[in-house]
Image (cartoon, rainbow, N blue to C red):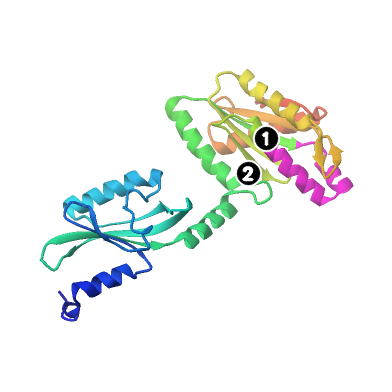
Amino acid sequence: MDDHLSEFPDELLRAAVLQSPDWLWIFGASGIPVCVSPASCAGTGLYETVYESDSPEIRAACDRLFTQYVPFRSAFRVVLPNGSCIWLEGSGYAFRAPDGRKRTALSGKDITPYKQMEDRLSRLAYYDPLTGLPNRRLFQDRISQTLHTAKRYQHKLAVMYLDIDDFKLINDTYGHATGDELLTKVASRLSHSIRDPDTVCRMGGDEFVLLLQQFLLPEDIAGIARRVTHTLSQPFDLSGRKISLTCSIGAACFPEHGDDSEALLQNADAAMYVSKLQGKNHFHFYANTE
């Protein structure tokens, strides 16, 4: 032990623990806490405090720490007595007790503000700030993952491209604030029109893309398009003003209409353009004319 630390009696070290603003558990040989800082939820046990979904990882790391003295560092959530959660940056480590035997400890520092900032930055990077939907960047991530699974297990997937008809006219007539309100309500209706495994994204302006999976026949996609068209055709109440709209939709399926995300998106967009040319308020599958 360090010469300076050897001057500190056990009582002084215990007092330091009891007054520490950080979370700290010191464990006995059996892994049972023998000293807990007051910050650690008023002295409750470790596993009673860790958030349920984070508990298996922390239990496994602590088991290795208790039995093999393997140190670890991990971020995890704990539940406060009032039911709220905070994030801790935890460090598990072994040390020598005054009797010369190895003991273990877990210290934690509150990093909730950092995590909250991280979440805000993530939302700015991957979600549309107006509608809250995934943006183009997150769409690319999700379709890449979905395509990987589809190719591996020979599943089908489809990309559906949707554009609101004459949205510029709505903006010019009622103003951009009303246009933004309309887009948020369109986003909400689209989110409620898709199934659990599917994703709806805002690509920009009045353009939306739906990533559809786990279907068997093209008619399944056509059925979703009919449901979306019907849902969006119902009048929107915007600050007491009733506004009706239509949309044009195009779809491209994997593997028939492309085997990568760029081809599927481009071909769904091309099919949507055909819907526009044929009088709007239509749905079309991509048709290869080569």
Residue 188: image location, x then y, percent: 68, 39
Looking at the picture, how far across and down is residue 254, in whole percent?
Answer: 55, 28
Q: Which mark is residue 133?
A: 2
Which tag, 2 or 1, sits closer to the chain's start? 2
Q: Is residue 99 above or below residue 222?
A: below
User: Quadrant location of the N terminus?
Assistant: bottom left
| Residue 182 rendering spot, x and y as whole percentages | 77, 43
Residue 42 is inside the magenta segment: no
Residue 177 location (% of width, % of height): 80, 51
Horizontally, residue 128 falls left or right of residue 37, namely: right
Quadrant of the image containing the C terminus: top right
Q: Visible in this render: residue 269?
A: no
Question: Is the stretch drawn in magenta largely helix, strand or loop?
Answer: helix
Q: Residue furthest left?
A: 100
61 or 12: nearer the viewer: 12
Residue visible at 67% across and 35% down in the picture: 190
Residues drawn in magenta: 164-189
- Please state which of residues 5 and 169 is positioned toward the viewer in this rendering: 5
Q: Which SS class for mark 1?
A: helix
> Element at badge 2?
loop
In the orientation shown, which residue stands out farthest toward the right? 173
Name the residue located 11 percent from the left edge and 62 percent from the top edge. 101
68, above or below 164, in the image: below
Quick check: marks 2 and 1 in contact, CB under 8 Å?
A: yes
* Residue type pointed to by label 1: Leu
Please state which of residues 175 and 249 is positioned toward the viewer in this rendering.
175
Q: How many marks?
A: 2
Q: Which residue is mark 1?
A: 190
The answer to whether residue 113 is visible is yes
